[in-house]
Amino acid sequence: MEYSHEFIMPNDDIPFKMFIFEGKDGNYVREKHWHRSVEIFALFEGELRFFLNEKEYPLKPGEFMLVNSNEIHSIQSPKANRTIVLQIPLATFENYYTEERFIYFSHSSRLQDEEVMRLIEDMYETYARRDCGYELKVLGQFYLLVYLLVAKYREMEVSMELVRRNKKLNKLSAITAYMKEHYTKDLSLESLAKIFGYSPTYLSRMFQKYARTNYKTYLDHIRLEYAYKDLVNTSDAIGEIASNNGFANSKALALNFADCTDAKMQTLTEIFKDKNTNDWLGYNRLFESNLRKTSI
């Protein structure tokens, strides 16, 4: 199982991110990932299944889940639900760090905290209405929530193993953020290791141990994510999209797309059918080759 690092930007008008969970319609899975922000999932209707460091936490209406900074987690949303998500920059809590510049929140006493749930719902409704002065009211509610998290859920004693793992993921987060900013360039393992002051061997081990994938695969996934958006949202030719997103050519893009989507016995014609290309039809995993038009 591969893990991915998620880079989170706050909303434009408030110092955190708040939204309705994208898996609200059910039949949704968010694979394992981590981020520096502290995250809250507040469930008001339906059900969710949370997995934190391989441990399952089923959520019922009226419950919320606190996800710590750099805590690897995944989410399953089998049915329709109403869930409000908050993503709070870690720096919000910097005055309450331990000596190791670390803060950790408990998962054990999250159940049925009516005060926290009511505050999150009121905050979202205030933000959604956007009446005059809404920013001030939302900020007041937000800092009350931060106070409740620190007062009720902060763990005062944290194991050194947890601290060490957090530091490693912090370093890896900085590296993956750099990769997302420079993915269109020729970004070799050796050049990236030099930028961050590691040996290529050490950096490779970091990816294997903490991201559970190799460096090349992780970089290709970043490139594919952006290439897919261009394929869906632009009329650019396939070769141009491949080049703009760090791939050598359309064949390299097709090979990576097929590998990542496991497109066995299916060509990628459906995805590329509206693209401006003369001969390329897609990559077929059955034949392990690209399909092209031929003339007789």
Image: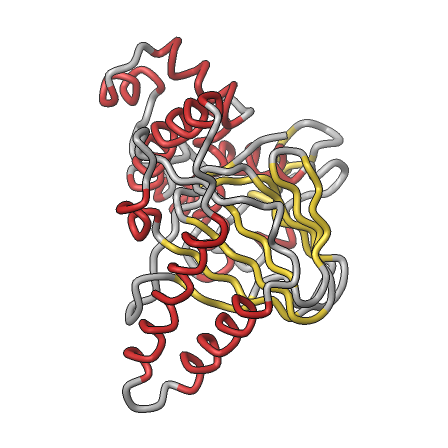
Q: Is residue 224 left or right of residue 141?
A: right
Residue 285 percent across, percent down from the top left: 70, 32
Residue 65 percent across, percent down from the top left: 59, 53
Give the colouring mode of the picture: secondary structure
Q: Compared with residue 268, is residue 81 higher up or lower down, i.e. above or below?
A: below
Q: Compared with residue 118, is residue 54 higher up or lower down, i.e. above or below?
A: above
The mark total stands at 0
* Nearer to me, 39 or 231: 39
At x 50%, y 24%, the residue is 210
Residue 137 percent across, percent down from the top left: 33, 80
At x 34%, y 52%, the residue is 89
Q: Is residue 96 left or right of residue 247?
A: left
Quarter of the figure that contains the N terminus: top right
* Nearer to me, 176 or 274: 176
Residue 156 percent across, percent down from the top left: 43, 38
Q: Compared with residue 159, is residue 201 higher up or lower down, i.e. above or below?
A: above
Image quarter of residue 28: bottom right
Whether residue 215 is visible here, answered yes or no, is no
At x 38%, y 72%, the residue is 141
* Nearer to me, 265 or 220: 220
Image quarter of residue 63: bottom right
Quarter of the figure that contains the C terminus: top right
At x 65%, y 63%, the residue is 112
Q: Compared with residue 170, is residue 124 higher up or lower down, i.e. above or below?
A: below
Whether residue 129 is visible here, answered yes or no, is yes
